[in-house]
Image: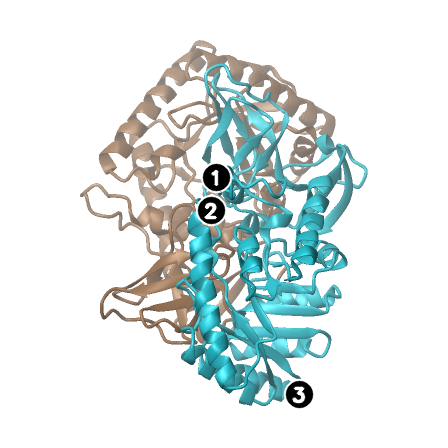
Chain colours: A cyan, B brown
């Protein structure tokens, strides 16, 4: 693990770079806004920890009213349970017996659930729960338009739910109905149409469950790009939003209901970097690249410099060019870069430096950094 | 840091996934081939540790005859010096006084050098060396076509060399002439043209140095995509190749001198993953995604399954589709994925599992994982 890049109380300009920084005012406003949305809509918020992999963030979300956390891996679940999160849902299929044994071992200390989309998955999870002498919650993942994991809606999903209900060691909890592909569709109308189709799949599956006298206590899904749509549908019970705490260029680029970019949450996450070269008159080079920021969704943005943008990214560098007589940062200057995709960016860092009013207020461990197993 | 995903002696199918694995036969052949090239061409090999961030790999390269290692960050240099590497060149501009102080602290234990492309950079490095009472080697980075860092060739570069030669605490070592942009140009002829232009910039700068009675003991540059070209030019003295040890889809895609894909090195690096969903008839889902593989250079490949390919990647999943009646892996099967870009992929992992003949032979710590400061 790398040493922390700052000390509490440091001015931001004393933070060693590259470093992941969070603007606490924006971060806290984002958590409060999502919590308020859930209260007003009467729907549970279960934020996704794959975004932050950080117990300090998870605890603040729960303190604001979240019912627990989602994770994508058993390693993430271990870190959150160790930090005191009492309800963790693995929104993923787990089929490896050694991973299922680790998950079952957590079930003595927290409410633990996972997904299944195959009879084999149900059987493997049941075996692990039985061997550990615990109960695992289990949801059927339904294919609702994402085309990744998930069993077909309706009868096939309900048949699998029946297997879960019949399996000793498993509790049938409900349905996972997540369309990740819909989250970043740029047009609001396209996202609404995708979630409407997902709702049809949920409705069909709930009807098939009812014919078996099975009840879905939880219908989970949604993300930062579509959550008001799932809430309005009246079918989902939990919103598994992740990126809203930090935001990124990808989410800022999508269109809100009015046709303008979605302004609901503030950018709270930045990569702090230092300008290490001004050798070219039209360009500056910052010391943060692919090992500090994920770039598969495009290049990062540059905050606070009009008329200059990031035009290239390599392992340890971002190349900044000015347009015409735009404003280029000077050699040695600290700059703030805006990640294009927050989840894999956070996973590159061991620490989040939480700042307010130009100073370091807290330093958080990304304790589940790398916990993909 | 995450626990290691395997134990020595395990069969590969017992390795926990996702895990980074290296095929030792291919890896050793790659190191031997590059070492032989250097011997035959009479040019030094200084492999780039930004590719592997792993002392075990660095030590094998040095054992095979490499003169030392390149790094891109002070953190990488610290890890390599601690592991016993005696000559480390930071092929990067370092302008932060606290980083320069850390670098100078290493100079008592190893030969340490860095680049400069500005008078301010020279002054800052000289101050750090003076304060630590050590010598730092310093090279002028010359802009040779990459358009990132690097001072203009010829007189401006030679003027900066003179400043280095005159600065107490710094030794003028030579020139850095690296065109990273040329490495992945798909056509061999385009790469050759780019390196020919870089050669002109080197020649012009060497002439300007000669007029000042300055000698470039080192002219560094080259990468896995172009190294025979720099070697043939007779101007460069060191090849700073990195990716050749592991290879990736990006390098395999470039054209060799005959117009066919470059076959010089073998793919030794893979991400081992498990199939966690076969719910869709035409698809399989593996449990390795953006947090296990960099994807800004495209999706990973799938080894060993004809007629199936990776068509999507998300945080913890790769989506595999078959073409027609192609061969899809079964639920629970281990699959090997081929990263599109090796350097940022390795940086996502704490461990490299080194395998031979289907078994785990060694487990290497990626000790400089995350060491971007």
Q: Earlier in the sequence, mark 3 or mark 1?
A: 3
Tag 3 and tag 1, C-beta contact below 8 Å: no
Q: Which of A244 and A105 is in front in this view?
A: A244
Q: Using the image, name the chain to which the residue with label 3 belongs.
A: A
- Of the residues under marks 1 and 2, which one precedes in the sequence? 2
C-alpha span from label 3 to label 1? 53 Å
Q: Is mark 1 on a helix, strand or loop?
A: loop
For the residues tagged 3 and 1, is the chain the same? yes
Left or right of A361 on screen, residue A260 = left
**Quadrant including the C terminus of chain B:** top right
Based on the displayed image, in which of its 4 quarters is residue A43 positioned? bottom right
User: Label for residue A16?
Assistant: none
| Quadrant position of the N terminus of chain B in the picture | bottom right
Choose between A189 and B361: the one closer to the eye: A189
Q: Residue A216's spot in the image, x, y percent? A: 57, 76
Q: Name which residue lies at 70% across and 47% down.
A: A3
Which chain hosts label 2? A
Label 2, on which residue?
A: A188
A278 or B257, nearer to the observer: A278
User: Closer to the camera, A271 or A239?
Assistant: A239
Left or right of residue B198: residue B158? right
User: Residue farthest to the left?
Assistant: B258
**Residue linked to disc 1:** A259
Q: Is residue A217 above or below residue B323?
A: below
Q: In this view, does A348 lie to the left or right of A9?
A: left
> Residue beneath label 3, please?
A133
């Amino acid at each position: 693990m790398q040493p922390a890049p700052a000390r509490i109380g440091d001015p931001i300009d004393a933070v060693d770079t590259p470093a992941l920084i969070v603007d606490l005012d924006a971060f806290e406003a984002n958590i409060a806004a999502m919590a308020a949305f859930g209260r007003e809509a009467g729907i549970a918020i279960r934020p996704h920890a794959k975004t932050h992999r950080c117990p300090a963030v998870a605890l603040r979300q729960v303190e604001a009213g979240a019912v627990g956390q989602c994770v994508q891996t058993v390693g993430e679940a271990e870190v959150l349970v160790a930090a005191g999160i009492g309800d963790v849902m693995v929104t993923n299929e787990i089929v490896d017996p050694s991973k299922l044994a680790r998950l079952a071992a957590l079930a003595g200390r927290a409410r633990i659930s996972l997904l299944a989309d195959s009879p084999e998955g149900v059987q493997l999870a049941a075996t692990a729960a039985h061997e550990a002498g615990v109960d695992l919650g289990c949801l059927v993942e339904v294919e609702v338009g994402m085309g990744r994991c998930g069993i077909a809606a309706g009868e096939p999903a309900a048949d699998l739910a029946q297997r879960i209900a019949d399996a000793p060691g498993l509790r049938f909890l409900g349905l996972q109905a997540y369309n990740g592909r819909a989250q970043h569709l740029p047009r609001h109308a396209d996202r609404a149409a995708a979630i409407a189709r997902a709702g049809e799949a949920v409705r069909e599956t709930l009807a098939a469950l009812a014919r078996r006298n099975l009840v879905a206590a939880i219908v989970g899904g949604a993300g930062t790009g579509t959550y008001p749509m799932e809430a309005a549908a009246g079918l989902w019970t939990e919103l598994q939003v992740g990126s809203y705490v930090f935001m990124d260029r990808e989410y800022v680029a999508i269109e809100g209901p009015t046709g303008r970019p979605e302004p609901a949450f503030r950018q709270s996450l930045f990569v702090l970097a230092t300008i290490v070269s001004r050798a070219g008159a039209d360009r500056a080079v910052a010391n943060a690249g692919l090992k500090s920021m994920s770039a598969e969704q495009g290049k990062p943005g540059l905050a606070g410099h009009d008329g200059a943008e990031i035009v290239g990214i390599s392992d340890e560098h971002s190349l900044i060019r000015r347009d015409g007589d735009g404003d280029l940062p000077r050699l040695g200057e600290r700059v703030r870069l805006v990640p294009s995709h927050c989840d894999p960016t956070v996973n590159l860092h061991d620490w989040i430096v939480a700042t307010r009013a130009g100073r370091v207020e807290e330093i958080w461990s990304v304790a589940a950094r790398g916990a993909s197993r």
